[in-house]
Image (tube, grey):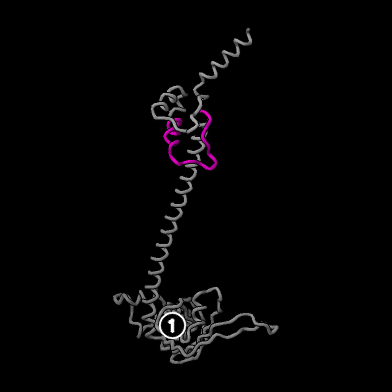
Amino acid sequence: MALVAAGIIALLTGCSDPYEKEIPASGFIAAGEAEKIAKKLNESDRDIFKRWAARAPTSERFPGEAIPHNVRIALMNQTRFEAIQAEKAAKDAERLEEERKAAEKMKKEQEEDELAYLAIKEADAVIKEYFVARPDSYNIVPIFNSYGALSHREWQFNVKLTNRTPKEIIGMSGLVLVKDAFGEEIGLYNFRVEPRVSPGKTISYTLSMRHNPKDPAHMAMLKTETLFFEWLFDSLAFNDGTKLDYQSVSRLNNPQDTPDMKTSWP
C-alpha cells in the first residue's frame, strides 16, 4: 500500500510540474493559455516561454527544430533559437562593420589617389616645359633564358627624350597611360628608369615592361592594332643630386620666396 501511495504521489507531483505540461500536437498555444502556463514557471523562464509561444505559429525555426513535447523542451528550443539568432546578428554586425571599414578605406585610397594624380599633373606640366618624351614605336618581344627557352614576353616602348634643362638628367619617374586607337584608356602603369640625357641633347630610349597574361589591360593591348601612350612625369633626377618634382614645383609656385627657375635652377 505504501508503494502504491508513493507512486500516486509521484504521479500527482509529476502532473503538477508546469515544466512537464504537454504541448498540443499542433505546436500552437493561444496567448491566454501561454500566459497561464508562464505564470507557473520560474521568473527567469516566463518571458522565454512567452516568446516561444509567440514564435510557434510562425515559420521561424532553427535547422532540425521539431514541435516540443512539453514546456521544458519548448524552453530549450527557444533558448537555442535565440542563441543562434544572436550569433547570426553578431556575424552580420561584424560583416557590416568590415564592409563599412572597407568602404572607408576604399574612399580614402581613392581620395589619396586623386590627390596624388593632381600632384603628378602639376609636376608634369612644369617638367614638360624642360623635358620632352616623344613616343617613337612599340612592340612586344620574346625574351629567352640562357638555355634558349622562352622565358617571357616583354613590352618595349621606344621614345626620344630631349633635355632642355641646364643639368644632366640621370633618371625619371611617373605614369604611362596606355590608350587604344579611339582614345579609350586601357591601362595605367608606374615607371622609374635611369636614362642619362645631357643638357640640350636628345637620345633614343627603350622603356620595358614585362607582359603579364593575367593583366586584363595587357591582354587588351595584344588585341589592339594601334596603341597610344601618354607620359606623366612626377620627378626628374639630376646628376648633382637635385630633383624636379612636386615639392620643388610647389616651391616654384611661390614667387615671393623662390627665384625664377630660368635664372636659378632648383
Whether residue 135 sits left or right of residue 250 in the image: it is: right
Q: Position of residue 248 (x, y in %)?
A: 39, 76
Q: Position of residue 58 (x, y in %)?
A: 43, 39
* Quadrant including the C terminus: bottom left
Q: Which residues are magenta?
A: 48-71
Above or below, 87 relative to 102: above
Magenta-span inclusion, residue 16: no
Whether residue 263 sits left or right of residue 147 in the image: it is: left
Above or below, 115 relative to 260: above
Q: Residue at x 46, y 85 (%)?
A: 227
Above or below, 90 relative to 32: below
Q: Nearer the viewer, residue 183 or 173?
A: 183
Magenta-span inclusion, residue 63: yes
Q: Residue furthest top?
A: 1
Above or below, 110 relative to 61: below
Q: Residue at x 58, y 15 (%)?
A: 10
Q: Residue at x 44, y 24 (%)?
A: 37
User: Which secondary structure type mostly characterizes the magenta part of the structure?
Assistant: loop
* Quadrant including the N terminus: top right
Few, some or many C-alpha atoms within 10 Å of disc 1 (few <14, some 14-19, many ≥20)?
A: some
Q: Amino acid at mark 1?
A: Asp
Q: Which residue is mark 1?
A: 180
Q: Nearer the viewer, residue 158 or 132?
A: 158
Helix, strand or loop under label 1 = loop
Q: Position of residue 38 (x, y in %)?
A: 44, 25
Q: Position of residue 92 (x, y in %)?
A: 46, 49
Quadrant housing residue 105: bottom left
Q: Residue furthest left?
A: 256
Q: Nearer the viewer, residue 125 or 57?
A: 57
